[in-house]
Amino acid sequence: MTQANDPIKEQLQAARTNQILDAAIRVFAERGYHRATIRAVAQAAGVADGTIYNYFANKEALLIGILERLNQSAQRRSDFAAGAQGDARAFFTSYMRQRLQLLQADPALMQALLPEVLANAELRAIYREQIVAPTFEIATTFLQELMERGTLRALDPALMARLLAALTLGTVMLHVIGDDVLEARLAELPTAIVDLLWHGLAQGNNDDEPTAPAGSAGPDV
Amino acid sequence: MTQANDPIKEQLQAARTNQILDAAIRVFAERGYHRATIRAVAQAAGVADGTIYNYFANKEALLIGILERLNQSAQRRSDFAAGAQGDARAFFTSYMRQRLQLLQADPALMQALLPEVLANAELRAIYREQIVAPTFEIATTFLQELMERGTLRALDPALMARLLAALTLGTVMLHVIGDDVLEARLAELPTAIVDLLWHGLAQGNNDDEPTAPAGSAGPDV
Amino acid sequence: MTQANDPIKEQLQAARTNQILDAAIRVFAERGYHRATIRAVAQAAGVADGTIYNYFANKEALLIGILERLNQSAQRRSDFAAGAQGDARAFFTSYMRQRLQLLQADPALMQALLPEVLANAELRAIYREQIVAPTFEIATTFLQELMERGTLRALDPALMARLLAALTLGTVMLHVIGDDVLEARLAELPTAIVDLLWHGLAQGNNDDEPTAPAGSAGPDV
Amino acid sequence: MTQANDPIKEQLQAARTNQILDAAIRVFAERGYHRATIRAVAQAAGVADGTIYNYFANKEALLIGILERLNQSAQRRSDFAAGAQGDARAFFTSYMRQRLQLLQADPALMQALLPEVLANAELRAIYREQIVAPTFEIATTFLQELMERGTLRALDPALMARLLAALTLGTVMLHVIGDDVLEARLAELPTAIVDLLWHGLAQGNNDDEPTAPAGSAGPDV
DNA sequence: TATGAATGAGCCTTCATTCAT
DNA sequence: TATGAATGAAGGCTCATTCAT
């Protein structure tokens, strides 16, 4: 269509694309993908209905565009690698924090995306293969290393990667469903989650918690 | 005119209602609520389109009907109370097992329900208030007791209830998204989850797990 | 089907038919023929939906049934003949009174009937041929007689019959549309209409009205 | 975005609106409002089904649109005022002629409108308040003036206004029902009606009609 | 490129009618 | 005869998408 590389044109196009995508996220989050109309997205973006089709093939492409945007955020895979070096627990905490910050940065994004990703087999596959699976692979490797190094207990790393992801996803979901407690303590969540993950619920595991009675024999970790 | 409660008529009606609800679960799970047509549900149920409207006010009422069915399953709240007596860990395991069995008993149910519950503000409110909130209340009390009794570490019970729920919900979600590993190990999940919850990931917490090599080196953090 | 002449059975059937017709009139008048459902008529009649079809072939047959009932009321054609003898003006008044009493006796009947009779070509034809045309024929003859006898001015009797009918129908229509003044003076209407018909609007015609200046010529009939 | 009032766009929209309204009148008159489908109206208008909804909110809005068109025709209220000056009888005649010309100009309009206006409580209220009531008010004042001036007999002006309207409406209705005589003499109607209104039926009232030979001794027929 | 009117396929829902009990 | 659950045709309406301007 257009010249492949007119930098100004490309920038304009990217800006329009984002403008529309932002609007779509807002509207999809508000009303749900199916109840949202292209007209509503266009109005929210301040363009005409038809204009959207100059940037996206169809309504579903908007969803895929949103998914791609999430994907880019998720491209912090390297984080795992980075974390493998230093303090494992600190790394987990910062990882959780980063993940949950998505919720605060763009609370609508997951709200817009999740329901239809769950409902639509095609999107589900994209999400699974482009976001979930790569994350699992890296996380599994990472956990395995930590286990081999003796930092973590020797558990099934692949399964643990799933449970970690489940905890994150589930938290996001509860947030979407709407829970006052969760919303009020969003800031403490990363610490609390990692503390739970690290020491578990059972009495006697913790060695660095104020709740643990002082003077207990030796360090248990 | 006729007696309001003809037992035979009532049974027939209940049977029809369930027949239609089963079909709706199948079809909604397969295609997603919005892409599913009433006609498809009717065909799956083996009735005419119009018959559905003799039992449900409209399409959304089907969804609420499914939600109510889930609600009945969830009425096992008493489980928490029961569990408070015996071995806490065994109780957690059986609780998890029961929850996750929903997935095996009717794998389509959550698939049919979750996306639209997340997308639809009204359903979200119903789900939150009728299923999530009561569960949280009971779970919080239960955890608090265990903490006071010294069985569990003294953490924030309300927050822990959320994290437990997040773990369960997140597992369900990953299952819906579709993960081979998770699916393959569905049977081990309850044990694995409770082990993680109990002892955490960190080395040295576990005192009863064969998977943790005894005498492992030093503290890792 | 059934024996042609079991008098008890026939009476029962007639009673049921009327019971259903009464209900139909009420419901049609309230909601309009098309918005009225067979179910609503059945409930108003205190029978089951299906029962109606034992007495009427279909929904439209209810309307025809109502039309026939009106027709029976209209069978007072003989009235015209009767009136031809005595005081013409008194006869007109009593005729108008009788016609407009339909409105008071069963105010719903015309409301139920008129709209659909106007809308439906088939019913229109029935109404025209079974009610309107015969009335016109008799009325025309009657007027002609009075004109020949010198009681009335020599006008076109066929046209006058139409205008008389128009005045009656139009009054009914205004009543259906709902006019406070008309409703308040329903009782005076026959007299007022006949006075208008007799003497017209113009000053100087009237000889027996208190509003008319005394001293006007002789008696007019 | 665009100027709210682009004159060309407005003209196009008005043209489309009229095009659809014309079609609706035709189809409603032909089949009746309820039996008429949006699809049929669309085809008669030469547009797609959906297009209609770009100009009218729903099917009922078409009816209201037709009502408004009638309303505009009826805005000739000033006629009454104009008539008050000159020859009262000539005015009545021209008023009647104008009213009945609606029937000749767009014979389908009343046919399309009347049945549903009578049947639908909401439309009835609109018709009553926007068309009937204002007409009554003006007509009553007008008649009162003529009575005070001595042109007309001193009757109840409010009631006379109703009877005049009834005569007009009733004539329209008979026309809709279909009467050969009425149709054949549509042209004479205004004169005939006003003659009737002026002089009444009774012998001896008339002083200026060619049908009543002046000075004729006895009865003329 | 942007616009937004036009399109028409598709779906939920209603409801007259049937028929087994 | 009475019942009322089941039927399925039909129609109003929505909305993603197209395309002439």
Image (cartoon, coloured by chain):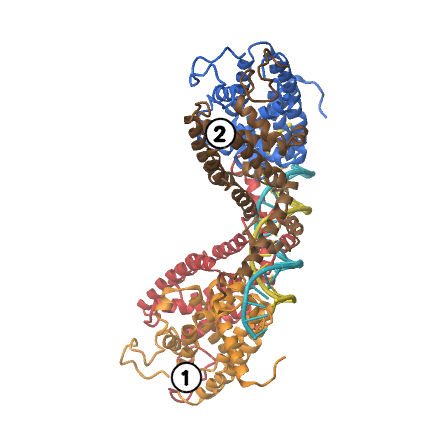
Chain colours: A orange, B red, C blue, D brown, E cyan, F yellow
> Is mark 2 in CB contact (under 8 Å) with mark 1?
no
Residue C165 versus residue D191: which sits nearer the camera? Answer: D191
Q: Which mark is residue D162?
A: 2
Q: Secondary structure at mark 2?
A: helix
Q: Report the amino acid beneath label 2.
A: Arg
Q: Is residue B194 left or right of residue C149?
A: left
Q: Is residue A132 left or right of residue B215?
A: right
Q: Find disc 1 in the rendering and name its residue.
A: A91
Q: Is residue D3 left or right of residue C155?
A: left
As drawn, the residue found furthest toward the front would be D215
Q: Where is C150 relative to B42, above or below?
A: above
Q: Where is B185 relative to D18, above or below?
A: below
Q: Nearer the viewer, mark 2 or mark 1?
A: 2
Q: Position of residue A64 (x, y in %)?
A: 56, 73
As drawn, the residue found furthest toward the left would be A215
In the rendered structure, the residue with mark 1 lies on which chain? A
